[in-house]
């Protein structure tokens, strides 16, 4: 049973293969590998309910430490959310390499902000309500999703000129065990290859700039935060501090913990459905308004 403070289940996140475009048997259309920007990595999958207009939507962001992972890893969730009346948009973004400056921070943020703007620019074709577009991410993707809720300012660079008449800020965020303070000595080993060639102690200002916790304001979007109590990769204290910062600014927030580790794992389809129901209910009913 799911409670506000504890989820007594564990979730398995896994990839689901599909055709480039396929119609499922559950009232969902899936179109894969749509280009949303100029770079080869700029592809996304769209999962659409068969029926409805002005639908809520969610940009889905995979994990992988900002240097691995793929939108295929979250296609199962994209489909499931679409089956509950939400337009799901699974996004690939730049994977970092500390030896390639163009792949370092804020390349990841620039990519996902562009994906949000692309979705709003194509809202009519997607039958999407632009003011009801949220973000949900897992681990590193959770970190990026939180950034989409804390700032409306596009990351600097060439990508900012694409769909620049659209906002990149989302109406709400579902953060699954995302790190939010890269300065925290209890998180990581002092270097994050996806972001910088320098260590944390060599340039703390850069790590602070990549930490959404420090950008929380009264205008931050509402958030649902989910994290395991035994997470050995991202300390539970990170999610707790994010929730505290949001409450301090009177931003609506729900923090749900479950007994388990960093990644959801070892769960039955029925248990997985409980997670999807909880998250989709939030996306359907608790999103903020950007009108």
Image (cartoon, rainbow, N blue to C red):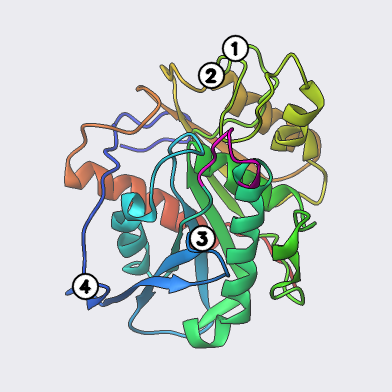
> In the displayed structure, would residue 215 be above or below residue 122?
above
SS label for mark 1:
loop
Q: CA distance from mark 2 to mark 3?
A: 25 Å
User: Which numbered circle lies on residue 235?
Assistant: 2
Q: Are marks 2 and 1 in contact (CB under 8 Å)?
A: yes
Mark 1 vs mark 4: in front? 1
Query: Which quadrant of the figure contains the C terminus?
Result: bottom right
> In the displayed structure, would residue 236 be above or below residue 290?
above
Residue 7 seen from this side: yes
Relative image position of residue 203 (x, y in whole percent): 78, 22
Which residue was labeled with disc 1?
186
Query: Which quadrant of the figure contains the N terminus?
Result: top left
Q: Are marks 4 and 3 in contact (CB under 8 Å)?
A: no
Which residue was labeled with disc 4?
26
Judged by its main secondary structure, the magenta piece is loop
Circle 4 packing at 10 Å, graded few (<14), some (14-19), many (20+), is few
Circle 3 packing at 10 Å, graded few (<14), some (14-19), many (20+), is many
User: Which numbered circle lies on residue 59?
Assistant: 3
Res 281 quadrant in image: bottom left
Question: Mark 4 or 3 closer to N-term?
Answer: 4
* Residue found 36% across the figure and 61% down from its top: 78
Q: CA distance from mark 4 to mark 3?
A: 21 Å
> In the displayed structure, would residue 252 be above or below residue 210?
below
Between 71 and 234, which is closer to the camera in this rendering? Answer: 71
Q: Which residues are magenta?
A: 95-102
* Residue found 40% across the figure and 49% down from its top: 278
Relative image position of residue 12 (x, y in whole percent): 26, 38
Q: CA distance from mark 1 to mark 4?
A: 43 Å
Mark 4 vs mark 3: in front? 3
* Residue found 64% across the figure and 32% down from its top: 180
């Amino acid at each position: 049973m799911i409670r506000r403070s504890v989820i007594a289940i564990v979730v398995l996140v896994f990839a689901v293969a599909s055709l480039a475009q396929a119609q499922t048997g559950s009232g969902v259309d899936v179109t894969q590998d749509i280009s949303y920007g100029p770079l080869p990595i700029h592809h996304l999958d769209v999962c659409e309910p068969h029926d409805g207009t002005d639908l809520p939507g969610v940009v889905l962001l995979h994990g992988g430490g900002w240097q691995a992972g793929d939108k295929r890893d979250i296609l199962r969730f994209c489909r499931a959310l679409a089956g509950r009346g939400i337009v799901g948009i699974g996004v690939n973004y730049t994977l970092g390499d500390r030896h390639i400056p163009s792949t370092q921070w804020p390349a990841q943020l620039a990519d996902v902000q562009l994906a949000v703007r692309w979705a709003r620019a194509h809202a009519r074709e997607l039958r999407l309500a632009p003011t009801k577009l949220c973000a949900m991410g897992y681990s590193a993707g959770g970190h990026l999703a939180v950034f989409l809720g804390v700032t409306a300012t596009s990351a600097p660079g060439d990508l900012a000129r694409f769909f620049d008449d659209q906002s990149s800020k989302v109406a709400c965020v579902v953060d699954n065990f995302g790190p939010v303070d890269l300065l925290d000595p209890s998180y990581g080993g002092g270097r994050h290859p996806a972001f910088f060639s320098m260590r944390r102690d060599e340039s703390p200002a850069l790590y602070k700039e990549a930490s959404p916790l420090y950008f929380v304001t009264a205008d931050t979007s509402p958030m649902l935060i989910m994290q395991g109590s035994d997470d050995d990769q991202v300390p539970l204290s990170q999610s707790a501090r994010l929730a505290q910062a949001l409450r301090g600014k009177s931003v609506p927030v729900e923090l749900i913990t479950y007994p388990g580790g960093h990644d959801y794992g070892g769960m039955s389809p029925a248990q997985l459905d409980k997670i999807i129901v909880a998250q989709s209910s939030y996306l359907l009913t608790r999103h903020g308004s950007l009108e």
